């Protein structure tokens, strides 16, 4: 069985590629390097079981011949990150819709399975945290810019379920809640690497509003154990699962922890929400209910957000001393 990973040069995709190579799978890694980086895969680039294809997922003629019956296609390629999505609403929408269609079409023709990375953003401003898979989903088309991401992911979920239910393509939909860890970059508005970068350079850490928004930060290693547990469980196929850390923290507590742990002199600065965060798409409190995956596989996250932050601090501190 082969594993085909789209978005393999991204933060999660590169971690998944390395993990599945360790488990001795043959991997086909697809990325167009729109935000991904070759550096993320440099430690395995000459691995005999890794084939890397530089192309957009939509260009399926470049990769479909690698797919064969029983393979799993992990679809992680997407336009991601609040800043990038807000600035490129149209491209986000078409990229996320068209790449999903290409993956499902290839999976259908070649009799593959599909693991799709959806997002906790689909819950919108649901009132009752923690969010369960059975909760109503919400999104507002009028939130010009931001909505392109969440609505494309919701449409992707519908496409996945259509192919699963009507065309016999086994699909797992994973709703990811703030996955963090080594290798995550700050460029597109990810909060933990952004705060760490500010603290290490002595710049202020900017908090939006009162900083009391809550998030559960899931270490990418915990995410990978969830993925490997799910794909081995026959009953997981055809279903939707939350994957995330259910112990949450406020953004303010996160910022203070980063400043203290890095012995930084940086200050916390509170500002109004920037344009990309105003409106009904922004979720104040985000916490997954993980009972469904726990009941099926026994999985729950083992790594605290503090340990994840410590790992990222060490990595970025070492890089900053090397002038990277
Ligand atoms: N990181 C999180 O906390 C989080 C939360 C929810 C959902 N997700 C989902 O997980 C997936 C991976 O996220 P990430 O944080 O690793 O993001 P990332 O930006 O690091 O990775 C995405 C990768 O996809 C590639 N890509 C984009 N469009 C492509 C296309 N059309 N063809 C080929 N490659 C393409 C990019 O170059 C990049 O390498 C995404 O689908 C994202 O929506 C992530």
Image: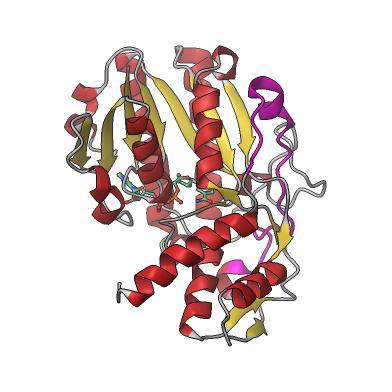
The reply to whether the magenta stretch includes residue 269 is: no
In front of the other: 261 or 282: 261
Image quadrant where one finds the N terminus: top left
Q: Residue at x 64, y 49 (%)?
A: 139
Q: With 167 as the anchor, is 288 left or right in this view?
A: right
In front of the other: 142 or 204: 204
Q: With 128 as the anchor, is 40 left or right in this view?
A: left
Number of callouts: 0
In front of the other: 43 or 115: 43
Residue at the outermost right position: 128
Q: Residue at x 66, y 21 (%)?
A: 296
Dividing the picture into quadrants, the one containing residue 239 is top right
Q: Residue at x 65, y 83 (%)?
A: 268
Q: Residue at x 71, y 69 (%)?
A: 253
In the figure, 98 relative to 316: above or below? above
Q: What's the magenta region?
A: 277-302
In front of the other: 184 or 156: 184
In the figure, 79 relative to 76: above or below? below
Residue 146 visible:
no
According to the image, what is the colour scheme of the structure?
Answer: secondary structure
Q: Main secondary structure of the magenta part?
A: loop
The reply to whether the magenta stretch includes residue 284 is: yes
Q: Position of residue 289 (x, y in %)?
A: 74, 38
Q: Position of residue 308 (x, y in %)?
A: 56, 55
Q: Position of residue 247 (x, y in %)?
A: 73, 49
Q: With 228 as the anchor, is 205 left or right in this view?
A: right
């Amino acid at each position: 069985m082969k594993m085909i990973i789209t978005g393999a040069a991204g933060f999660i995709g590169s971690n998944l590629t390395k993990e599945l190579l360790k488990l001795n799978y043959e991997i086909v890694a697809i990325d167009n390097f729109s935000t991904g980086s070759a550096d993320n895969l440099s430690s395995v680039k000459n691995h005999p079981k890794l084939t890397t294809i530089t192309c957009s997922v939509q260009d399926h003629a470049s990769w479909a011949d690698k797919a064969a019956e029983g393979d799993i296609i992990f679809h992680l390629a997407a336009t991601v990150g609040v800043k990038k999505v807000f600035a490129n609403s149209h491209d986000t929408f078409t990229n996320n819709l068209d790449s999903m269609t290409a993956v499902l079409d290839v999976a259908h023709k070649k009799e593959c399975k599909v693991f799709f990375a959806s997002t906790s953003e689909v819950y919108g401003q649901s009132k009752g945290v923690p969010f369960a898979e059975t909760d109503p989903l919400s999104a507002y088309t009028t939130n010009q810019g931001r909505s392109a991401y969440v609505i494309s992911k919701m449409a992707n979920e519908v496409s996945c379920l259509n192919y699963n239910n009507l065309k016999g393509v086994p699909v797992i939909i994973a709703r990811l809640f703030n996955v963090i860890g080594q290798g995550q970059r700050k460029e597109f508005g990810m909060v933990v690497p952004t705060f760490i970068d500010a603290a290490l350079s002595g710049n202020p850490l900017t908090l939006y509003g009162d900083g009391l928004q809550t998030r559960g930060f899931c270490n990418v290693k915990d995410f990978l154990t969830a993925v490997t547990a799910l794909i081995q469980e026959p009953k997981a196929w055809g279903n939707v699962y939350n994957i995330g850390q259910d112990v949450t923290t406020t953004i303010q507590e996160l910022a203070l922890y980063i400043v203290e742990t890095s012995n930084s002199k940086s200050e916390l600065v509170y500002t109004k929400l920037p344009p990309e965060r105003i409106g009904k798409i922004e979720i104040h409190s985000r916490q997954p209910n993980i009972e469904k995956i726990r009941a099926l596989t026994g999985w729950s996250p083992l790594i605290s957000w503090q340990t994840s932050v410590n790992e990222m601090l060490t990595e970025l501190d070492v890089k900053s001393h090397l002038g990277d």
